[in-house]
Image (cartoon, rainbow, N blue to C red):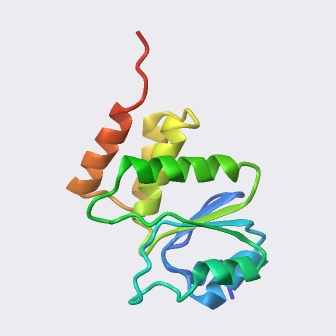
Amino acid sequence: MSLAAIPRFIALDDALATAGQPSEAQLAAVAAAGFEVVINLGLRDPSYALADEGKTAESLGMQYVHIPVEFSSPGLGDLARFSEAMAQAQGKKVFVHCRHNKRVPVFVALDRVLRQGWEEGDAFAVMRQAWTPDEVWLTFIDKALAQRPRCS
């Protein structure tokens, strides 16, 4: 199975890809492609989530991190946990997903700006390839960016 079959799959570089919710077979394709870490920002909603994605990912030899982010109310604590997971996964091939690949590009962009030192324009241009955030998410982005230290 091809990674392109995963809903809204985007390879950002050789070590980072994002997507919507994969099936079990698609998760196996993620493992076969050499991904070592799966970070899931989606909820445990039985209408779309796998019954036990963590167990499936681990059985395929991948580390699994679940950070459930409410789509209608993303939090700075969620972002902090995501950035910590990304820092711990440094040097590994990482697959990050949620239900529709909308939460993920915002979190990736904010992590790139706040932790990795990317320019906002570059980080958010990549985000906009996947999704244009709505008002809830624009407010969250502003709140997250306001937390960073300012140079005096």
Q: Which residue does the image show at 57% across and 85% down from the upper left? A: 52
Q: Nearer the viewer, residue 73 or 18?
A: 73
Q: Which residue does the image show at 47% across and 66% down from the upper left? A: 41
Q: Is residue 15 left or right of residue 144?
A: right
As drawn, 105 above or below 60:
above
Q: Quadrant of residue 70?
A: bottom left
As drawn, 116 above or below 58:
above
* x, y percent for residue 147: 37, 32
Answer yes or no: is residue 125 visible: no
Q: Is residue 36 left or right of residue 121?
A: right
Q: Which residue does the image show at 45% across and 68% down from the upper left? A: 101
* x, y percent for residue 132: 32, 58
* x, y percent for residue 131: 37, 61
Q: Quadrant of residue 54?
A: bottom right
As drawn, 86 above or below 3:
above
Q: Nearer the viewer, residue 150 or 122?
A: 150
* Quadrant in the picture for the N terminus: bottom right
Q: Quadrant of residue 6?
A: bottom right
